């Protein structure tokens, strides 16, 4: 496979050959080059008005008073785009100290909007820390959704609690646990799974050399966890409820192929999921009653709910084989991201 000049420059700056090879295998050369240009571009600093504490107009007034130029993206009136390099000035604002704003990438604002939280809804955030999307869901519901935020890593769970308090989120229960092991006792109206991933969308070469940790092994591990988490998401959401699946990856292995493999698994994938279920069950609760064979995995009955056009207005997209989902292309404004809304049918 021949490489372009842009790909050679990225390789010289340390972009792992495994990542380059995967991008080039999924996307046309000009699309891969556009991704690399996005990795290399200094990224704008973006933030969200925390409407639990301040209106967008109040935040705009504070930005104006501090002399920080801003604009709003078409898809979201609560979001602000400021120049690359303005982060120190943003962190110095009173609004920042008081939790009236949250620094968040534009792409990361899409999954909570796709989930569309409403007052009174019982919502699970399966992989929540540091909590940008938990806080956004709370704000979108006017502080009236009942949110359970799950996080496996103790240090990150502490950061999550800190952010929830700073942002004034009251109706949120933090569970420090592995979401794959959530009890079947729990049922939610909506589930957000912002899954741990290879980070192939958030690569930045703007500051010089590549500093991420992409490897084929990380990708393989991520896919395995993502599949188990997404299956669990469908076990915990009620029939008719919505699961929003998101990653900050632009690799189909972690995105549309992963969703496909959960919605329409091959015989091999079903057998593998059953084996994984058996291993998880043995670690968690000792031997399963009624034998030691693979725990049969129930088929998932769900369909994609197409993302609304307004949500993707002005958002740069990569080709995506799952109709109705979106894969955001990294640019100077956006990180690479994947979002799909899925409805459990029965
Ligand atoms: N949603 C977060 C936000 O908007 O701030 C970002 C989430 S980050 C992409 C993924 C998180 O999932 C990490 O904090 C990681 O520690 C956590 N995680 C990984 N595996 C998990 C598991 N099995 N159960 C719960 N949390 C997990």
Image: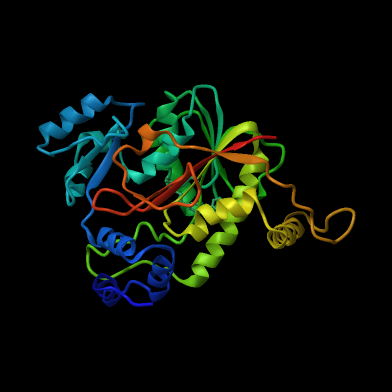
Q: Who's the residue at 17% across and 31% down the image?
A: 62
Question: Which corner quadrant of the image does residue 268 belong to?
Answer: bottom right
Front one among 161 and 322: 322
Residue 98 in the image, given as x and y percentages of width and height? 28, 33
Residue 30 in the image, given as x and y percentages of width and height? 30, 63
**On-image quarter of the N terminus:** bottom left
Question: Which corner quadrant of the image does residue 94 belong to?
Answer: top left
Q: In this view, does 30 lie to the left or right of 296?
A: left
Front one among 250 and 224: 250
Q: Who's the residue at 24% across and 74% down the image?
A: 5
Question: Which corner quadrant of the image does residue 227 belong to?
Answer: bottom right
Inspect this view and state whether residue 110 appears: yes
Against 19, residue 245 (above or below) is above
Residue 176 in the image, given as x and y percentages of width and height? 56, 47
Front one among 173 and 328: 328
How has the structure been colored for display? rainbow
Q: Who's the residue at 25% across and 48% down the image?
A: 333
Q: Who's the residue at 27% across and 76% down the image?
A: 8
Front one among 319 and 210: 319
**On-image quarter of the C terminus:** top right
Residue 175 in the image, given as x and y percentages of width and height? 57, 42
- Label count reads 0
Inspect this view and state whether residue 179 appears: no
Q: Residue furthest right?
A: 290
């Amino acid at each position: 496979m021949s490489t372009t000049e842009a790909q050679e420059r990225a390789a010289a700056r340390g972009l792992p050959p495994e990542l380059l090879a995967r991008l080039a295998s999924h996307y046309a050369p000009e699309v891969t080059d556009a991704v690399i240009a996005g990795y290399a571009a200094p990224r704008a600093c973006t933030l969200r008005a925390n409407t639990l504490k301040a209106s967008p107009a109040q935040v705009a007034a504070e930005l104006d008073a501090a002399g920080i130029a801003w604009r709003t993206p078409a898809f979201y009136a609560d979001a602000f785009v400021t120049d690359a390099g303005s982060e120190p000035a943003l962190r110095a604002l009173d609004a920042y100290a008081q939790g009236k704003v949250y620094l968040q990438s534009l792409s990361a604002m899409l999954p909570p909007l796709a989930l569309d939280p409403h007052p009174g809804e019982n919502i699970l955030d399966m992989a929540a820390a540091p909590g940008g999307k938990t806080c956004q869901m709370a704000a979108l519901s006017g502080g009236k959704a009942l949110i359970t935020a799950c996080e496996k890593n103790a240090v990150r769970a502490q950061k999550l609690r800190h952010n929830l308090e700073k942002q004034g989120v009251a109706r949120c229960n933090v569970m420090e646990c592995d979401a794959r092991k959530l009890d079947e006792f729990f049922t939610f109206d909506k589930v957000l799974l912002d899954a741990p991933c290879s980070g192939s969308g958030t690569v930045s070469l703007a500051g010089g050399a590549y500093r991420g940790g992409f490897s084929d092994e990380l990708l393989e591990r991520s896919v395995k966890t993502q599949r188990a988490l997404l299956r669990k998401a469908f076990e915990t959401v009620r029939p008719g409820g919505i699961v929003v699946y998101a990653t900050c990856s632009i690799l189909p292995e972690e995105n549309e192929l992963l969703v496909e493999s959960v919605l329409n698994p091959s015989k091999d994938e079903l057998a593998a999921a059953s084996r994984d279920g058996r291993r998880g069950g043995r670690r968690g609760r000792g031997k399963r009653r009624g034998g030691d064979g693979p725990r049969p995995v129930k088929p998932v009955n769900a369909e994609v709910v197409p993302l609304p056009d307004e949500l993707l207005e002005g958002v740069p997209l990569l080709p995506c084989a799952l109709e109705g989902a979106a894969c955001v292309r990294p640019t100077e404004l956006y990180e690479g991201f994947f979002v799909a809304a899925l409805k459990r049918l029965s």
